[in-house]
């Protein structure tokens, strides 16, 4: 089954404690991206990757890191989480450069206290 | 940069009627627009894509139109059902990224 898998689904952490949210896709997509969703603000892109070893900042990259060492995986890293990073996060993948649909993961609800 | 605006934050429609959602874009005319459905706490799910040279696209009870003169796309659900209740997102892919509207929360009233 074609899917994007995020883990964990829910996470509560403390300020400053490094964390990683994993994202994996099984569709051989070149393009992967991370979004955060906040009430009234919609989905905003954090980082994206056009292919392996190629990553770029989206609209709200501050406080986040990503890596793309393999085509299928695109982890999101918060080196020192802060309460303003409390949000619902989504990973997505699609074929790059074509007008095709994006597939989204189930979401990760992060709370930083 | 491109901005996508969905003017109605919420829309209530009687079951069986046609729901019409509006998406307006600023700046340049996108090559295409996508529409997604999102249920609470879940990831968006792709519904339809319409290119700028297409006036209309249909899929079962769904219809999307694209008017480059008005810089607008309309999304219609005919014979609406309570199961159609969700948030609908208008999305543009350009400059290597997806730009989302804030969505319209549609409620179908039985």
Image (spheres, rainbow, N blue to C red):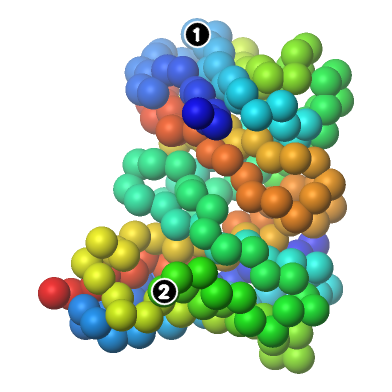
Q: Is residue A83 above or below residue A97?
A: above
Read off the chain for label 2.
B
Under circle 1, the secondary element is: loop
Check disc 2: other Cα within 10 Å, few if <14, some if 14-19, many if 20+: few
How many numbered badges does the structure rendering display?
2
Q: Is residue A110 visible?
A: yes
Rendered image quadrant of residue B49: bottom right
As measured in the structure, the alpha-carbon distance from the residue carrying label 1 to the one carrying label 2 is 48 Å
Q: Which numbered dot is residue B61?
A: 2
Quadrant holding the C terminus of chain B: bottom left
The residue at 78%/31% (across/down) is A30
Q: From the viewer's side, name the closer residue of A80 and B10.
A: B10
Q: Residue furthest bottom?
A: B69
Residue linked to disc 1: A17
The residue at 45%/70% (across/down) is B60
In the image, residue B47 lies at what x, y percent?
Answer: 52, 59
The residue at 36%/22% (across/down) is A10
In the image, residue A102 lies at what x, y percent?
Answer: 62, 45
Q: Do pointers 1 and 2 mark residues of a single chain?
A: no
In the image, residue B40 lies at what x, y percent?
Answer: 33, 48
Check disc 1: other Cα within 10 Å, few if <14, some if 14-19, many if 20+: few
Residue B28 lies left or right of residue B37; in this view the side is right
Residue A8 lies left or right of residue B91; in this view the side is left
Rendered image quadrant of residue A80: top right
Q: From the viewer's side, name the closer residue of A15 and A45.
A: A45
In the image, residue A70 lies at what x, y percent?
Answer: 75, 14
Quadrant holding the N terminus of chain B: bottom right
């Amino acid at each position: 089954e074609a899917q994007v898998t995020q883990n964990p689904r829910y996470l509560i952490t403390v300020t400053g404690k490094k964390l990683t949210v994993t994202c994996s896709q099984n569709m051989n997509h070149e393009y992967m991206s991370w979004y955060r969703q906040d009430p009234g603000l919609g989905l905003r892109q954090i980082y994206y990757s056009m292919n392996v070893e190629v990553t770029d900042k989206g609209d709200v990259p501050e406080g986040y890191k990503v890596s793309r060492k393999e085509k299928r995986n695109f982890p999101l890293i918060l080196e020192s989480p802060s309460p303003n990073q409390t949000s619902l996060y989504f990973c997505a993948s699609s074929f790059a450069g074509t007008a095709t649909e994006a597939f989204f993961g189930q979401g990760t609800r992060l709370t930083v206290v | 940069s491109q901005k996508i605006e969905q003017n109605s934050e919420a829309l209530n429609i009687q079951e069986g009627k046609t729901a019409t959602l509006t998406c307006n874009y600023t700046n340049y005319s996108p090559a295409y627009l996508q529409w997604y459905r999102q249920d609470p706490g879940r990831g968006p799910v792709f519904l339809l894509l319409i290119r700028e040279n297409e006036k209309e696209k249909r899929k079962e009870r769904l219809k999307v139109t694209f008017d480059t003169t008005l810089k607008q796309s309309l999304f219609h659900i005919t014979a609406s059902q309570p199961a159609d209740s969700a948030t609908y997102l208008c999305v543009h892919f350009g400059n290597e990224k997806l730009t989302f509207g804030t969505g319209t929360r549609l409620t179908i009233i039985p």
